[in-house]
Amino acid sequence: MPVPTDGLRRVLGWCAVAGPVLFTAAWLIAESVQDTYGPRREDISALAALDAQHAWIMIAGIVALGLSLVALGVGLVGAIDDGRSATVGAILLVVAGLAFVVAGFARDDCSSELQACKTRVKAGNVSWHHQVHDNVGIAVFLFLVLAPLMLARAFRRDRGWRDLRRYSLITGVLTLVLLLVFGGGSFTGWNGLAERLLITIPLVWIAVLGTRLARIPVRADASA
């Protein structure tokens, strides 16, 4: 990937901050204008499903988050003094961002946590885009585990980012642990709340990295 200029890098950093904010605002607004929706039980994707009343709000939020991840990944290119790990981490962010965009447009047919929808899923009576959304959603969370872990490795070699190494490592590990715990089906009836807790951890990390990217002067030579 080409190395962005200093000015463009700062813009990309603030775009990375905007994504999590817009995504969170989208789910709060969308659930408030939905007549029948249980945030404790139902997941965020239900707000963008085909039967959602104002699906465009959540679709816009998901796409905004995806584009912010792409912005962060591109902005980090050349900004960290660790070639391979930094590059892989940046690529993971870009791929995660593109996957979010796909998930935004490949909408669920219905709210997957409601019994009627679960029955349709088990019977295979859902559309291809419902299946794509669910599969892409799993991949996105895996990318959001791998990206912090890979960048934590890169940060240890750069003084400008070293203080975020432990935070990034904790973010990746905690996201993985919660993904395994919540994915085990032990929180039936609380899936919506569990998902919000799970997604908030990498969202905050994305905003933190975006803020650092926008504020730290980028050196002409990263090893200087």
Image (cartoon, rainbow, N blue to C red):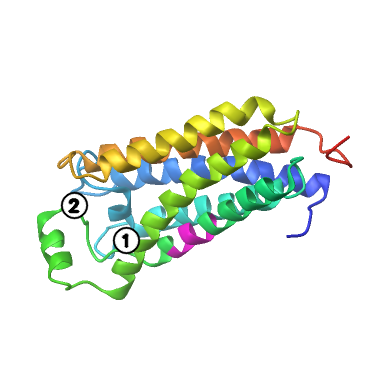
Q: Which residue is mark 1?
A: 134
Q: Nearer the viewer, mark 2 or mark 1?
A: 1
Residue situated in front as seen by the camera: 130 or 23: 130
Q: Is residue 124 left or right of residue 223?
A: left
Q: Is residue 198 left or right of residue 1?
A: left
The stretch in magenta equals 97-102
Residue kind at label 2, given as amino acid type: Glu
What is the secondary structure assignment of the residue under circle 1? helix
Classify residue 13 by image quadrant: top right
Residue 29 vs 130, above or below: the answer is above
- Farthest residue in the top direction? 163
Quarter of the image where the N terminus is located? bottom right
Q: Earlier in the sequence, mark 2 or mark 1?
A: 2
Main structural element of the magenta stretch: helix, strand or loop?
A: helix
Q: Is residue 57 left or right of residue 63?
A: left
**Number of marks:** 2
Residue 156, x across and y down, in percent: 68, 32
Residue at 18% across, 65% down: 121
Residue 223 vs 124, above or below: the answer is above
Q: Which mark is residue 174?
A: none
Residue 136 vs 90, above or below: the answer is below
Q: Mark 2 to mark 1: distance in Å?
A: 12 Å
Classify residue 14 by image quadrant: top right
Residue at 63% across, 52% down: 88
Residue situated in front as seen by the camera: 66 or 1: 1
Q: Which mark is residue 113?
A: 2
What is the secondary structure assignment of the residue under circle 2? loop
Residue 55, x across and y down, in percent: 34, 58
Residue at 31% across, 53% down: 47
